[in-house]
């Protein structure tokens, strides 16, 4: 149940081709270039501990130059971790049993020359003197409490999938248009799926 | 109905446009608001942008559709399209020029306005402020670091158990928030916190621990929440006898309140400025985009308003143009829809009034024409039912109208000759010449009524017409034309004559014939009784006298018989008769006539056939020939030429039988009266010969007249109507056959 990374060359061709099609094919282009993900879920797993499912995952987060430049200039970047739990059904489509989103904001503070990661959900702050350290922190999810086992009806098999995305809509308004039109900014990982 | 559908369709389109305009305006307002804040509407920015674009595109499509329709109407030269196009162009020019100017200056203002936000000096001073803050913080950090090192120095000789007490003491002597002693693995050994509620200290950051373990002490500024800082100082506590390994001391210092606020202010100002600098181009793009969208909206709306109002304005004009065309095409019922309470509406009202009046006028004209037609038809029916023939001529003598009876009496179809003058009529129907000749002098004569008998030879033989004419008064419309009414009185005339002659015959029989027999008997008795008594001389006188008396009485008897014959009502036994054979047969009897008279026959080779009573016709020929021979008795080299001829005049065909001699001829004065009874030029004749001939001819529906040929002598021409269907299709030139019959 792992996602294969698509060939880079074909992606490049696809991106160039789509660029040529221009604005009218923008929608198509949007979907195609979304595959040019610089985010990747390397692996992820859950384990049950004291009746709570804990999530551990390793991500590979690579920011292209555009977002990095924006970050250096004080623009905060918001990274969303989307987690969905599915109940598999035999004859029907899979049912979403639970879903949650973790939002992290990465920003650069000029005065202390630090990169600060804040968990938007909890308000927790972490500061790093080095960008790589901050990204490494974001790339590692350990023992994140996902959900209570009691919330899931017993029996039946469940699937979990995880995705990391750069949230464009959280960007400053003037940048949103650029971000939507440029593939650099549309960063999202493929869904990574594994059994609960 | 069509107008209603058009109105509904237009209303629907209007509704659609308004439904589009409302959300579009809202989207544009939200869009301009979204760019200024990054709150909730900021998150919607892209969607707003997208929906505005889609809305504008729909608007554009609707307007392009309208413009295309207008263009097509213009090409098809639909009434009003030209004016609409012109108005649209004017409206668009009027609205677009100010919009374009405003747009241009707005763009300039936008570019320059945003650029003017940024200044190198501002940037430099912000950098300086940041640097100053950093220096101040660095001083503070150094101070904090030294203080921490001092505390760490005091901790060196102390055992782990005593550390908590010492830490609490140190905390009390300073502004430190939290003091924690960690083992090298990061485990908490002792801790003291200014806030007694916090029992568990914050963990040692991994990176910091690593750094300290490598032998480098750490002091750093760290954020707490969004706007506050604290300083974390981490130093080693060296090992000694009481402890085997080094300990790590972490001290958390607050940044003084006012200082923190200032530093935060400097930082946020710098961050904002930096962000703005970075976002300058996208910001401009966004502003320009929004402005352009608004501009586009304004232009499209103006365009739509232009098209819509031009249409509204031109619609009554177009209706008027269409209405005028309809009226020109004769459609007088055209009514235009109401066009509002303005000058155009007034015009439309006037148009409607005009078409109503026109329709009324047309209807009344139609009614009067119908009435006229009815009257005319009535008049025609009356004329057709008249037994008298009616002709009308205009003042030039051209034929205007005829009725059926006229055609029937004249035996021709005059209705086809309407408008023809007398010459043309005569050229077509030569047999009408007597009638025309009778009418002509009356036309030129004095106005008033006239009546005249006219005899002409038509298809059914000789006809006597009683014509009455009158000039018409001017107002009738023929400019002083003439009307001629005529009746066929042939039968009447015939009957009158027959009656007259029958009376004569009766008197003759009564008054003359009755005494004749006693006279004859008495004379014969005188002769028988006294002839033998008288002497020869006297006897001869008596003999001669009585003989004369008897002879004359006999002659008188014959005369009376002839009168009887004349007066007898005709009992004709008509049958087809080949005229040539008949003439040859009858004239054969005169072959041995003693006098030297030559009889020539010129017979038409087309073998004319007539309807005739053989006996009566034989009597006719005998009478005529006897008459001629008597006239030729005294002359030398006498010649009697008898000829038959088929003649076709217009649609009437007849057979002409003529007798021509080279005798003394008729007296010129009496040539018109020779057919009357008792008219004779011969010393010895009853005067009934030619009268009976004429009677027989008339019994056969023929005509007879006498002519005096230029070469001398006399000529009798008899015409019989040709038996229907007996006329050959192609008349050929008659060949003359001569039968010379020599006497003796």
Image (cartoon, helix red, strand yellow):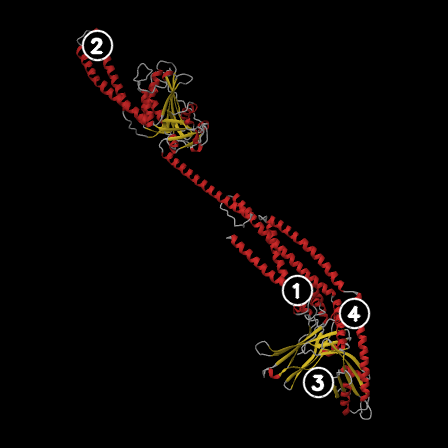
**Local crowd size for mark 4, using a 10 Å CA cut-off: few (<14), some (14–19), many (≥20):** some
Name the secondary structure under disc 4: helix
**Residue holding disc 3:** B198
For disc 4, the marked residue is: B126
Q: Disc 2 designates what residue?
A: B542
x then y, percent, for residue B506 = 24, 22
Q: Which residue is mark 1?
A: B31
Mark 4 or mark 3: which comes first in sequence? 4
Corner quadrant of residue B162: bottom right
Q: Earlier in the sequence, mark 1 or mark 4?
A: 1
> Residues at marks 4 and 3, common chain?
yes
For the C terminus of chain B, give its image quadrant.
Answer: top left
Q: Chain of mark 4?
A: B
- Discs 4, 3 touching: Cβ within 8 Å: no
Indicate the position of residue B372 as horizontal and vertical percent values.
42, 37
- Which mark is nearer the camera, 3 or 2? 3
For label 2, count other residues whose C-alpha is less than 10 Å away and answer few (under 14), some (14-19) or many (20+). Answer: some
Q: Are marks 3 and 2 in contact (CB under 8 Å)?
A: no
Q: Quadrant of residue B37?
A: bottom right
Instruction: Name the subunit of mark 2.
Output: B
**Could you say where residue B481 lies in the image, as x and y percent from the top left?**
43, 28
Give the CA distance from mark 4 to mark 2: 197 Å
Q: CA distance from mark 3 to mark 1?
A: 47 Å
- Spatial CA span between label 1 and label 4: 31 Å
Counting residues from the N terminus, which is met first, the one under dot 4 or under dot 2? 4
The residue carrying pointer 1 sits among few (fewer than 14), some (14 to 19) or many (20 or more) residues within 10 Å by Cα, namely many
Q: Say which chain tag 1 marks.
A: B
Q: In this view, which residue lies farthest toward the bottom?
A: B241
**Picture layout, residue B553 above or below residue A153:** above
* Residue B327 vs residue A24, the one in the foreground: B327
Q: Evaluate whether label 1 is on the same chain as label 2.
A: yes
């Amino acid at each position: 149940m792992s996602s294969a990374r698509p060939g880079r060359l074909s992606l490049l061709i696809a991106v160039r081709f789509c660029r040529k099609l221009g604005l009218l094919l923008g929608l198509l282009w949007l979907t195609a270039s979304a595959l040019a993900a610089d985010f990747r879920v390397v692996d992820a797993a859950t384990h049950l501990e004291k009746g709570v499912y804990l999530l551990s995952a390793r991500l590979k987060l690579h920011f292209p130059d555009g977002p990095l430049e924006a970050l250096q200039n004080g623009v905060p970047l918001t990274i969303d971790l989307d987690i969905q739990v599915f109940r598999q059904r035999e004859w029907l489509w899979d049912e979403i049993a639970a879903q949650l989103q973790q939002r992290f904001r990465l920003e650069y503070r000029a005065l202390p020359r630090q990169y600060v990661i804040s968990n938007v959900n909890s308000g927790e702050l972490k500061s790093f003197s080095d960008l790589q350290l901050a990204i490494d922190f974001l790339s590692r999810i350990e023992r994140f409490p996902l959900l209570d086992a009691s919330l899931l009806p017993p029996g039946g098999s469940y699937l979990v999938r995880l995705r990391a995305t750069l949230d464009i809509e959280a960007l400053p308004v003037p940048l949103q248009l650029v971000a939507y039109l440029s593939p650099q900014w549309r960063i999202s990982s493929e869904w990574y799926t594994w059994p609960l | 109905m069509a107008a209603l559908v058009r109105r509904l369709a237009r209303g629907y389109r209007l509704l659609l446009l308004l439904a589009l305009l409302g959300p579009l305006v809202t989207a544009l307002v939200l869009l301009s608001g979204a760019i200024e804040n990054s709150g909730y509407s900021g998150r919607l920015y892209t969607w707003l942008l997208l929906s505005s674009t889609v809305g504008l595109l729909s608007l554009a499509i609707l307007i392009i559709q309208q413009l295309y329709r207008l263009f097509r109407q213009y090409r098809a030269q639909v009434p009003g399209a030209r004016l609409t196009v012109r108005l649209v162009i004017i409206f668009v020019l009027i609205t677009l020029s100010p919009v374009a100017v405003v747009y241009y200056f707005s763009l300039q203002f936008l570019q320059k306005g945003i650029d003017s936000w940024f200044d190198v000096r501002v940037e430099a001073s912000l950098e300086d402020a940041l640097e100053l803050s950093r220096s101040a913080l660095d001083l503070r950090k150094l101070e904090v670091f030294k203080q921490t090192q001092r505390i760490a120095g005091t901790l060196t000789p102390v055992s782990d158990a005593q550390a908590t007490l010492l830490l609490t003491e140190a905390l009390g002597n300073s502004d430190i928030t939290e003091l924690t002693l960690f083992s090298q693995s990061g485990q908490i050994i002792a801790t003291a916190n200014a806030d007694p509620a916090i029992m568990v200290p914050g963990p040692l950051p991994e990176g910091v621990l690593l750094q300290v373990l490598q032998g480098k002490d750490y002091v750093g500024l760290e954020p707490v929440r969004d706007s506050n800082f604290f300083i974390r100082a981490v130093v080693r506590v060296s090992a000694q006898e009481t402890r085997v390994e080094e300990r790590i001391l972490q001290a958390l210092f607050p940044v003084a309140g006012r200082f923190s606020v200032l530093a935060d202010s400097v930082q946020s100002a710098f961050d904002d400025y930096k962000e703005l600098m970075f976002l300058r181009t996208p910001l401009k793009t966004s502003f320009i985009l929004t402005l352009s969208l608004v501009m586009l909206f304004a232009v499209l709306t103006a365009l739509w308003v232009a098209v819509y109002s031009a249409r509204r304005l031109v619609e009554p004009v177009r209706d008027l143009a269409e209405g005028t065309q309809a009226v020109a095409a004769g459609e007088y019922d055209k009514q235009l829809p109401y066009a509002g309470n303005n000058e155009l509406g007034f015009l439309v009202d006037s148009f409607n009034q005009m078409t109503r009046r026109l329709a009324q006028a047309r209807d009344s004209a139609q009614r009067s024409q119908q009435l006229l037609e009815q009257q005319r038809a009535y008049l025609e029916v009356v004329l057709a039912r008249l037994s008298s023939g009616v002709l009308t001529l205009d003042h030039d003598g051209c034929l205007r109208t005829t009725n059926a009876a006229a055609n029937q009496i004249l035996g021709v179809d005059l209705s086809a000759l309407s408008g023809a003058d007398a010459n043309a009529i005569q050229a077509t129907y030569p047999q009408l010449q007597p009638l025309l000749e009778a009418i002509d002098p009356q036309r030129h004569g004095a106005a008033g009524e006239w009546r005249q008998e006219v005899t002409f030879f038509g298809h059914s033989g000789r006809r006597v017409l009683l014509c009455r004419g009158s000039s018409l008064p001017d107002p009738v419309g023929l400019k002083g034309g003439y009307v001629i009414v005529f009746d066929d009185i042939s039968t009447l005339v015939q009957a009158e004559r027959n009656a007259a002659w029958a009376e004569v015959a009766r008197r003759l029989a009564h008054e003359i014939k009755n005494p004749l027999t006693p006279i004859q008997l008495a004379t014969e008795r005188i002769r028988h009784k006294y002839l033998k008594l008288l002497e020869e001389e006297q006897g001869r006188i008596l003999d001669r006298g009585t003989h004369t008396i008897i002879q004359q009485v006999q002659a008188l008897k014959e005369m009376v018989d002839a009168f009887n014959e004349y007066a007898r009502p005709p009992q004709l036994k008509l049958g087809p008769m080949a005229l040539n054979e008949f003439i040859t047969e009858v004239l054969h009897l005169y072959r041995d006539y003693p006098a030297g008279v030559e009889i020539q026959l010129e017979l038409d080779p087309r073998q004319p056939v007539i309807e005739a009573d053989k006996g009566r016709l034989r009597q006719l020929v005998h009478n005529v020939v006897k008459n001629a021979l008597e006239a030729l008795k005294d002359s030398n080299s006498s010649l009697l030429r008898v000829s038959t001829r088929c003649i076709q005049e217009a649609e009437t065909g007849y057979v002409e039988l003529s007798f021509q001699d080279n005798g003394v001829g008729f007296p010129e004065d009496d040539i018109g009266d020779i057919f009357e009874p008792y008219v004779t030029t011969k010393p010895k004749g009853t005067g009934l010969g030619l009268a009976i001939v004429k009677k027989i001819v008339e019994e056969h529906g023929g005509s007879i007249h006498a002519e005096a040929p230029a070469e001398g002598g006399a000529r009798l021409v008899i015409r019989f109507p040709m038996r229907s269907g007996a006329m050959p299709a192609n008349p050929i030139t008659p060949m003359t056959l001569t039968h010379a019959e020599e006497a003796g």
